[in-house]
Image (cartoon, helix red, strand yellow):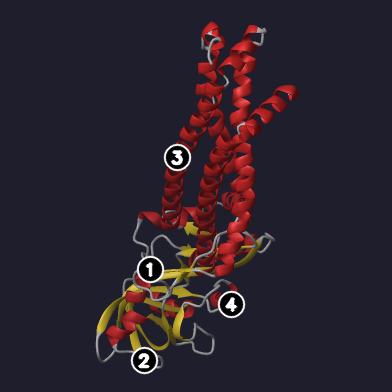
Amino acid sequence: MFRLGKLAFLNTLRNKRRSLLTVIIIVVSFIVLSIFQGYINSQRISWREMLIHGEYGHLQVFHRDYFEDDNTALEHVITEDQFKTLAGVMDKIPEIGYYTGRLNLSGLIGNEYASKIFIGSARDVSELAELHYFSPVKDGQFLTEERPDGILVGYKLAEKLKAGVGDEVMLMAHSRLGSIEAINATVIGLLNTDSYSVFNEMGVYLRLESAEELILGKLYHYIVILLDSYDSIPRVKSLLEAEIGKSKLPLVVKDFAEVATFFMQVVGMYEGYFLVALVVLAVLIVFSLTNTIYMSITDRTKEFSTMKTLGVRDKTVFALILLEGTFIAFFGVLLGLVLAYLSHLALNSLQLTLPPPPGSSDRIPFYVLFDLFRNLKLAAVFILVAALASVFPAYSVIKRNIMKGLHTQ
C-alpha cells in the first residue's frame, strides 16, 4: 500500500500544471467556506452569550402547565414554597452561579398626559450585576434597593406618555384575587432592550416587591438560572429534573435552546446558507477534479493498459487513480487550512463593520472565529468529495479495452 501511495504521489507531482489548477480551486473554496463558517460561529456564540446574559440564562424553570395559558396568567405559577424548595437544591449544585425568579404581568400605565397598556416583568435588583453583560438601560439607572418605587419604562412607551427619568406614573393590574390594584411609581430609567423587542414599545421593568403589591402575593412565572458554562447545561438540567421528580414539584426545566426558539431558527437559517454554499462549491470541485484526472488518464492510456497487461489487477489501478485525486485534495485542504487561519487573523485585525440592522443606528462588528474542529470536518468533506470525484475516471480506466489502449499514441 505504501508503494502504491508513493506512486500516486509521484504521478500527482508529474502533472503539476493540472494538479495546481485544481489545488487552487480547492484552496479558494475552502477559504471562502471557512470564513463563512467562522462568521456563523462568531455570531452564534456572541449572540447566544448576549441572550443568555441578558434575558434567558442557561436554564429556566416553569410550572408544568405554564405554556398552556397566557404568560401573564396567575393560575400556573411557582409559589414561594416551591421556589424555596428548589432554591435549596440549586444551592448545592456548584455549576449554578446565580438564579432569580421573574413574574410577568400586564395592565395600564398612565399619567396626566396618557394611559397605555404595558407588559411588565418583575425582577430582582441583583440582575444587572449578576446576569447582564450589557445594561438594558438607555437613560437613567437599573432597578435598585434605594428606589423601592422605581421602575424602568421602554423608551418608546415613555415617549407616548411624555414621561422621562424622574417623572411619576401609576401602574394598574389585576391581582390574583381578581381585584384591580394600583401603585404609584417613579421612572428611574428608560429601557432599550434590542431593535425588535416589544419591551421598547410597551415594556416596564419593576421590582419583585412592587409586583407583589399589585398581584397581592409572592409568585413567580419562571426562574432564570445562570451556570458556569454552556457545556454544563445537560448535567445541571438532569440533576434538577431528578430532584424535582423526588420532591414531586409540578415544575419543568427548559434549556436555552428550548426557550430561545427564535435564536435557534436564525442559526438554522445560517447553517442552511452554509450548506447551500458547500454544495455549490463541492460541485465545482467535483467537475474540476474529474476534468483534471480525465485529462491525466487520457495522456496515460498506454501506461494503464501496459500495467494491466503485466498483470496489475483492476482494483490496484482503481486505487491508484483514487489516491491521486485524494492527494490533490489533501494538498489543497492542507494549504487551505493554513491560509484560512491567516485570513481569519487578517480580517479580524482590520476591525471591519457591517451596516446596522433595521431599527438600529449602530454598525455590527464583523468578526470571524476560527474553529479547528469545524474546519477539520470541512477538510474531511473536501477530501471525501475529491475521492468520490475520482471514482468515475478510475472506473472508465478499468473498463477500457487493453488492446485499444496499447495502440493509443
Q: Residue at x 60, y 23 (%)?
A: 321
Sequence-first tag of 3 and 2: 2
Q: Which of label 4 and label 3 is nearer to you? A: 3
Element assignment for label 4: helix
**Mark 1 = which residue?**
357
Sequence-first tag of 4 and 1: 4
Q: Compare residues 216 and 31 and report the one nearer the observer.
A: 31
Residue type marked 4? Ala
Q: Residue at x 25, y 90 (%)?
A: 113
Q: Residue at x 52, y 33 (%)?
A: 289
**Mark 2 = which residue?**
168
Image coordinates for residue 44, horizontal then vertical, percent = 51, 58
Image coordinates for residue 32, horizontal then vertical, percent = 51, 51
- Is the residue marked by circle 1 packed among few (<14), some (14-19), or many (20+) residues within 10 Å? few
Sequence-first tag of 4 and 2: 4
In the image: residue 380, left or right of residue 94? left
**Mark 3 = which residue?**
279
Element assignment for label 3: helix
Q: Which of label 3 and label 1 is nearer to you? A: 3
- Is the residue marked by circle 3 packed among few (<14), some (14-19), or many (20+) residues within 10 Å? few
Image coordinates for residue 12, horizontal then vertical, percent = 63, 31
Sequence-first tag of 2 and 1: 2
